[in-house]
Image (cartoon, coloured by chain):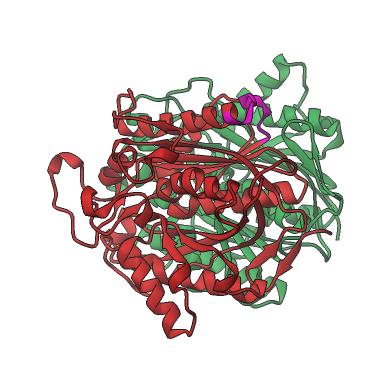
Chain colours: A green, B red
Amino acid sequence: MANHKRGRQSFALQEPPVITTWASVAGKKESEGPLAHTFDLKTKDTYFGQKTWEQAEKYMQQQALKKLAENAGMTLSDFDLVFSGDLLNQCIGSSFTLRNLGIPHLGLYGACSTMAESLLMASMAVGGGFADKVVAMTSSHFASSERQYRFPLGYGGQRTPTAQWTVTGSGAALVCSQGKGPRISACTIGTVTDLGIMDANNMGAAMAPAAYATIRAHFEDMKTAPEDFDLIVTGDLGQLGKEMLLELAKRDGVALGGKLTDCGTLVFDNTKQDVHAGGSGCGCSAITLCGYLLGQLKEGKLKKILFCGTGALLSPTSTQQGLPIPGVCHAVCITGGR
Amino acid sequence: MANHKRGRQSFALQEPPVITTWASVAGKKESEGPLAHTFDLKTKDTYFGQKTWEQAEKYMQQQALKKLAENAGMTLSDFDLVFSGDLLNQCIGSSFTLRNLGIPHLGLYGACSTMAESLLMASMAVGGGFADKVVAMTSSHFASSERQYRFPLGYGGQRTPTAQWTVTGSGAALVCSQGKGPRISACTIGTVTDLGIMDANNMGAAMAPAAYATIRAHFEDMKTAPEDFDLIVTGDLGQLGKEMLLELAKRDGVALGGKLTDCGTLVFDNTKQDVHAGGSGCGCSAITLCGYLLGQLKEGKLKKILFCGTGALLSPTSTQQGLPIPGVCHAVCITGGR
C-alpha cells in the first residue's frame, strides 16, 4: 500500500496527486480588491443576473466548474467526481450546481474549511486509485450568508468591529493522478475544537484554536516545522483570529510569525474596503487558493505551503439555543512546480 | 495500486474493508416497530432528557458513538476518523457530537443518503490506506426535522398521504482494514438527478429516479445484475417511491421485483403505526442497516446486499423559491460473513 496514515491525524501521499488546473469566480467587492488580477471571472452584479442570492451562489459554482473544464481543455463529462459543499442550508449551492450534469458527486459540510476538506478528500480519491480527474469546489455569497446567519441586508444592521465580510466567490480545483502543476503531498484532518466562544460576530476567535490544533498536529505527525514552509495560510481567521493564532502558537513555543498569513487578510484591502476584521466564508480561501496561491506555486514563487481551511461549525439554531461555536481546520500541504 | 475505478461511477476494493462493529439508537416510535429487537439502545423519551430536539439528536449520535466503542471493545480515542453528517442546518448534530473529543472528523452532507455516503467515504479512507478504524455515522430526529423542513409540531398540521415519517434514530458503523464481519466490496457514487418533482411532501417520488440511476450504474460498472444480490435495499423511498422505482426499472427492462426492499417500509409497521408512505430521514437507513441488515449479514442469513442510500437535496429556501427537488443515491455493496 503506497499511502500511509501518519500519526494521529495525518496521511502522506506516496504519489502526490497533481492540481493540474483551477478556476475562480469573484463578486464585485472581491473584484475591486488586491487579488483581482488573479481571478478568472469577475462581476459587477452581485446577483450574477439571477433572481435570488442563493441562485446567484449556484450560478457562481456553475461558472467556476465550466471555467475549470475550459482551463483544463476538457468537457464537464470528463470529470470523474466532484467533492463540494457550501454554507447554505442543506448545501443547495452545490447540489443545484450538479443537478442533471451526470457527474458523480459527494457532498461535504465543513463550513468555511470546505476548500481544504474537498482537496483533502480529492487527494484520498485520487491517491487511493478510486477516481481520477476529481474536482474540489466550494462557494459563498455575502448576501445569502448575511440573511441566513445574521440579518436580512434590508435591515441595515450595523456590523461589529470583530465581524468579517463573507466573500462572494467560488473556487474549483482539478486533482489528477498525472499531469503538471502543484502537488498535494500530505493532509491533516481536523478535530472539532471548542474553547467556548459564544459571539457569532467573532468567528476568527472561534476558529483560531482549531487552526492551531491542526497546524501543531501536522508538524507532529509529519515531523516538520514552520521553517519547512514558504507560507502557512489559514482560510478565514481574519485580522483578529490571526493574532489569536499567533498568540496560541507563541505560548506553545512555536514561532509561526514570519510564515503565517490568512486568506481573510489577503483578499480585501482593509485600509480601503472597510471589511472590519477581514474576509471570511468558504469562498474566501477558495478564490485566494484558486487564484493567487496556486498561481504563485505554479510559477515557482512559492515552493511549499500549508493550506489550512478553517470552519466555524455553528448554525443560527445552535446560537439561539445558547451554545458556543465549535471550530474545525483541515490542512493540505501543497508543493510548487509545473 | 490495489483499488480500481470501474466504469463511470463505481470503484471496487481489492482488499474489501470490514464492518467489524455497529451500533444503533432508536426513538420511541421506532422502538415500537418491527425492528425494535435489532436496536442497541431504545427510548420512550423523544427528548432523550435534553432541552431541545436538536440537542436530543446530538445526544443520540453521542450515544451511538459511545455504544459503537463499547461494542468494539475500544475507547473513543481508538477511532481514527469519523465521517458523519445529518439533516440539521449546518449539520450541528454531527459537529456538536464530535466537539472536543479529539477524533479527526470530516463532515458530509448527503441528506438521507448519508449512511451510504459515509460508508463509501470510510471504505475509500480504509481501502486507500489513509486511516483505519473509521466510523460512518448519521442521525435524524422526527421533531427537529418537521420544524425545520415543514411546520413546528405545535401547529398540529395535517400530513398528506404521500408524506413519510422522519425516523428518530442514529446509526454508526466501524470500518476497518482487518477483522471479522461483513465487507464492503464495491461502491457506486451517485449523480444529482432531478426530474422536476416539486412536492416537498412527496420525497419518495423525488428520490426514485436517482435511486434507479445509481442502481443501473452499479450493474453496468460492476458487470452485475439483480440476481447476484440477496437484497437491493434503498434508504427511504417509502411505499410510493419504491413502487416508482420498480416501475422505472420495469420500463428499462430490469426486473428488481423479488430483490427490492426499502428501509422506509421495513422500519415501521404501516398497518399499525400510521406513518403514511413509510419512514424517511438519515436515521431510517442508518438504524435499519446498523441493526437488522448488518445483523442478518453477520449471521449469514444474507450473503450480499446492495445498500442504496437515497437523499432529497432540497432546503426550505429552494422550495420557497419554486425550485424542484434534486435527488441523489449512493450504493455500497456489502457481502456477508463473520
Q: Residue B78 colored magenta? A: yes
Which of the two residues, A225 or A268, is positioned nearer the viewer here?
A225
Q: Position of residue A223 (x, y in %)?
A: 86, 30
When the figure is inspected, residue A262 is found, relative to residue A17, above or below; the finding is above
Quadrant location of the C terminus of chain A in the rendered image: bottom right
Q: Residue B196 colored magenta? A: no
When the figure is inspected, residue A218 is found, relative to residue B4, above or below; the finding is above
Q: Position of residue B213 (x, y in %)?
A: 50, 73
Which of the two residues, B265 or B227, is positioned nearer the viewer here?
B227
Which of the two residues, A36 or B278, is positioned nearer the viewer here?
B278
When the figure is inspected, residue A177 is found, relative to residue A72, above or below; the finding is above
Residue A221, located in which quarter of the rendered image? top right
Describe residue A120's horizontal placement relative to residue B255 as left or right.
right
Q: Residue at x 73, y 58 (%)?
A: B13
Image mark count: 0
Q: Position of residue B81 (x, y in %)?
A: 65, 37
Q: Residue at x 72, y 34 (%)?
A: A9
Does the rendering let one see residue B280? yes
Q: Specify the segment rendered in magenta.
A: B71-80
Q: Position of residue B86 (x, y in %)?
A: 44, 44
Describe residue B321's horizontal placement relative to residue A110 as left or right.
left
Describe residue A288's horizontal placement relative to residue A175 as left or right.
left
Does the rendering let one see residue A208? no
Q: Residue at x 62, y 69 (%)?
A: B9
Which of the two residues, B26 or B164, is positioned nearer the viewer here?
B26
When the figure is inspected, residue A37 is found, relative to residue B285, above or below; the finding is below
